[in-house]
Every structure is written in structure tokens, then in C-alpha cells.
Amino acid sequence: MAAGWFRTGLVRVGNQSRFVAVIRQEEQDRGYPLLEKSFTAPPVETEVAESKLLHISDTAPGIKRLRCGAGFRYVRFDRSAITAADRDRIARLAIPPAWTEVWICCDAQGHIQATGRDARGRKQYRYHPLWMAMQEETKFSSLPDFARALSRLRKAVDADMRRRSLCRDKVVATVIWLMDRLLLRVGNPDYARSNNSFGATTLRNRHLRDEGSGLRLVFTGKSGKMWSLKLSDKRIVRIVRSIQELPGQQLFQYVDDQGNRCPVTSQDINDYLRTIMQADFTSKHFRTWAATAAALEALRCIELPESERAKKRTLNGEIDKVAHRLGNTRAVCRQSYIHPAVPEHWLAGTLAAEVDAAAAIRLVAPELNDAERRTLKWLDFIDRTHA
């Protein structure tokens, strides 16, 4: 097998599906968690369960896209012609004409189907739909593990925020507090430079406004979404004000042992999370957990309407509320952030009864609030009863 290729997929373990994947460093750098263990996943479609994807790097031989008049022609690495099936697959990928340095996987089962550079020179990817589906399965199935680790994390964050100096642990803990409570994305320096879109680690001093007893973060986030977030917690206001007094444009900086000012980076955040949570969770897990808990808390209290139209209207209304908090559209919120079992079980009319039954489950997670505890117990309950 050529370098850069290995098999990955779903294997049966007992009566449950476990997805085992090892995501290479290049995927981790793009924000995916590095998974080196199995997660119990919800039942998946037979097509996905029986599939075998090739895990591939775009350094492997592939298909090139070459300009030909007003269109393009495609040539394999060995100069052989592509097949009709290749042409159909490439058409479905809908690779933008503006992309340059286009590489297309020779195999229809490659987990990466194509890469290229957009008009701004940023590397872009087209993934196999089954790979994307399995990523979503893995993310949602890891939520109970994340919630339990979140309780430990909050305890550590609270302790580090009590430190007197503006050391790395204190400032990083402060940023994580904001990511947890305000659902900020971690931030990407490239997007800050090219798009003027910001996240927790790329915020500037100009994004912070003093409102007397509190502070407000006002900035442009992903997809041009304007954020205006009030900070009213007295301790966080005091800490953020002291951090802002440091020289420089970057908002979140710490002072190292040599007295040097250092900006907080996404690597600092990931290192802290990994150390405390003992797993590779990312900022997206905070947003996924919060969205799932909020949706569950709202829907468990709403009686299922009789008509299909009323069901759809009610469900969309509650998802819209969660989406507004995340700064996402309804479609993105439901597909990528709310655990699919929440709307499914509500529409089936079983959600409220399941939440009540799950209340008897013993749970030690003191740093979780009541809604989060109900959500974690419910996830444990459906995992046991639907296994």
C-alpha cells in the first residue's frame, strides 16, 4: 500500500458500533480532535457501517486539473485518461473554478476527495460524505465523556483564575472560561488577517468596551457575524481589565517567567484542555454541548403538538433560539451542534419521559448546572436503553 494510505472504518464490537479512527496531524491542525481510541457511537446506516474508506494525504499521487480553453481537463498522475465514473465524481465535488493547485483523489473511497487553493491562497478541502458523517457520529458520541471532563475542567479553571500574577495558566484559564460561558470560537490568525473575523485567541483590545460595572466584547466573528457579549461576572471583569492593561494590540496575553509578554494561542488552549480533560476536545465541543443541553432543556418541557405542521413549527422555533446563541443558522445548528437524538426523541414523544426516568441515575459532576446534569443523565440513559 502506498505511503500515506491506510484503511479506516466502522467495525462491529458486540452489539454496538465503535468507530476507530486515527486522524493525522494535518487534520488536527485544521481543528479536528486527534482520536486514538474508540467511542461508542449511535446506530449508523448500513451503507456507512459497511463502508471502508481510504485515509489518504494529498501528497499521494492523484488527478490533476488543467486549464483547457474555457474549461478544464483532468489527467491522472500516470498520464492515463480518467474514466466516466471519475468525471461524474469530479462533477459532484463541485470544485470552484477559482481554485488553483487542485489535487483530486484517484480513489472514490478516499476520505479526502480533493484539495486546492482558494483565491486568497488558503488551502481548502473536499471530503467524502461518509467521512464527514462519521466525524459527526464520533463528535456526538463523545459528548458524555466531554461533559464529565468539563466538570473537572471548570474546577481547574476556577483555581487557575485565582492566581495572582498574569501567568500563562491564569490567562489561558480566563480565555477558556469565556469559551465555555460565551461559546466563543477559539480563533484563527489567518482569518483575523484576511477576513477580519475573530475568535477568543485573536481578539484585539479595540474589541473590548468598558461599560462601568461591566465589559462588552464587540467583534466580527465567523461568516461576518457581529457579536456583542456582555461580561458582568465581577471576577472575570477584574481579570480581563488587568489583562487589557498590558501593552500591545492583542487582548489576551500572559507574562512568562522571564517577564516577556506572550499572546495566547490556540495551541495554548489545546494544551491546557488536553492536560486537564485527558482527551483531545476542542472549542467545538463546548458549543455542541451547550447547544444540546439548551435544546433538551427547552423541548423536554414542551408537549408534542398533534399536527405535523405544528411539530415542525415548534421544533424550528426552539432550534432558532439555540442557533441565535451560537451565531449560526438553523440548519447548521441542527446538523452540527444539537445531538440528533434530542429532536428525534421529542418528535417520537418519548423525550420528557426519558428525562424523568434518567433522573434516578447517580451522577457525580458538581461543576455542571442542573440543565447539564439532566442532559448527561439522559445521554447515559438512552445509551443504556438503546444499546
Image (cartoon, rainbow, N blue to C red):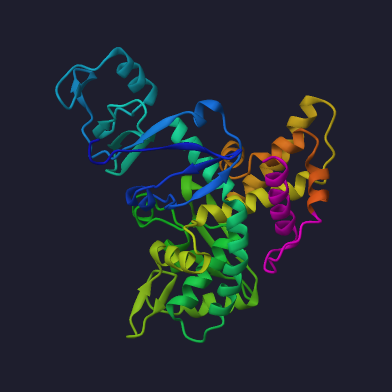
Foreground of the two, 191 or 342 = 342
- Residue 316 appears in the figure: no
Observer-nearest residue: 20 or 218? 20
Residue name at image x 61 percent, y 78 percent: 235
Judged left or right of residue 170, residue 78 is left
Magenta-colored span? 359-387
Residue 44 is covered by the magenta coloring: no
Q: Is residue 70 visible?
A: yes
Location of the N terminus by quadrant is top left
Vertical position of residue 311 compared to residue 36: above or below: above
Quadrant in the picture for residue 149: bottom right
Looking at the image, the residue that sits furthest to the front is 14
| Relative image position of residue 117 (x, y in whole percent) | 27, 39
Q: Residue at x 64, y 39 (%)?
A: 340
Give the residue at the far left of this rendering.
Answer: 79
Q: Residue at horizontal 42%, vertical 79%?
A: 246
| On screen, residue 117 above or below 235 | above
Number of on-image labels: 0
Above or below residue 311? Residue 204 is below
Is 139 in front, or is 322? Answer: 139
Picture coordinates of residue 43, whole percent (x, y)? 60, 35
